[in-house]
Image (tube, coloured by chain):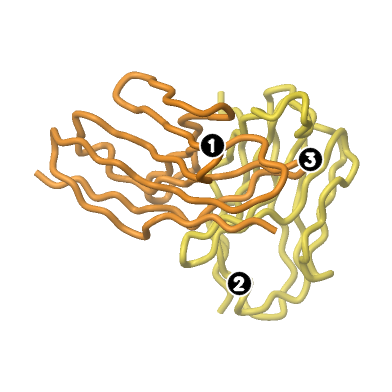
Amino acid sequence: GQNIDQPTEMTATEGAIVQINCTYQTSGFNGLFWYQQHAGEAPTFLSYNVLDGLEEKGRFSSFLSRSKGYSYLLLKELQMKDSASYLCAVRSGNTPLVFGKGTRLSVIA
Amino acid sequence: DTAVSQTPKYLVTQMGNDKSIKCEQNLGHDTMYWYKQDSKKFLKIMFSYNNKELIINETVPNRFSPKSPDKAHLNLHINSLELGDSAVYFCASSQDIWKRTNPNEKLFFGSGTQLSVL
């Protein structure tokens, strides 16, 4: 099976930087995804990592260390609209995505 | 046009009733899914279909029966609803089935159906 762990809640200030961590334990690792979900809405794709290192996409970056079973999502220049849940999801072998429980981020003024 | 659409958005019903949720995607994708998100926001896969064929059936009670009349539609029928079925149900699709050769298949989600069983 898979075990995905991420903090339940985080709070950060508008304009700041926040890092949301995700650790996972799985066999046959085949990629890690980050999704954003605003309250009452559908999850939307943010990033995908399969190789070690940092992937940057505008204000959002995602990092992966396969040897440590660790990823983080970095959000820069936080805006109020970034208040949402951030879901870490892992693909292993030939199985569909398994999601973590999500981190609810609150951005405050 | 909405890529993945599901109806209804809200469903309130009594215990013991039978209800259906419909899902359609206009992305031309081959694979569709049903996920359940409970009150703690945990998103868990229930079923997956590839080209109308059932691929994944997680440990879901027999009361839940998916039906895929064509690859653009995946409906979910629930018999004898129970209190514990209350959750948000998300339909999703992806271009193709997850494979080792194409592991970065993105999921596109519908807007969800909030089911409340009273």
Q: Which residue is mark 2?
A: B13
The quadrant of the rendering that contains the N terminus of chain A is: bottom right
Q: Which chain is yellow?
A: B
Of helix, strand and loop, which one carries label 2?
strand
Question: In the picture provided, is A21 more to the left or to the right than A68?
Answer: left
Q: Residue lying furthest front in this view?
A: A67
Question: In the picture provided, is B75 more to the left or to the right than B44?
Answer: right
Q: Which residue is mark 1?
A: A33
Q: Which residue is mark 3?
A: A94
Chain letter of mark 1 equals A
Name which residue lies at 57% across and 62% down.
Answer: B11
In the figure, the shade used to draw chain A is orange
State the image coordinates of residue A33 (x, y, percent, origin top left). Answer: 54, 36
Is the residue B14 above or below the residue B90 in the image? below
Q: CA distance from mark 3 to mark 1?
A: 15 Å
Q: Amino acid at mark 1?
A: Phe
Of helix, strand and loop, which one carries label 1?
strand
Question: In the picture provided, is B66 more to the left or to the right than B13?
Answer: right
State the image coordinates of residue A18 (x, y, percent, origin top left). Answer: 25, 40
B26 and A52: which one is in front?
A: A52
Chain letter of mark 3 equals A
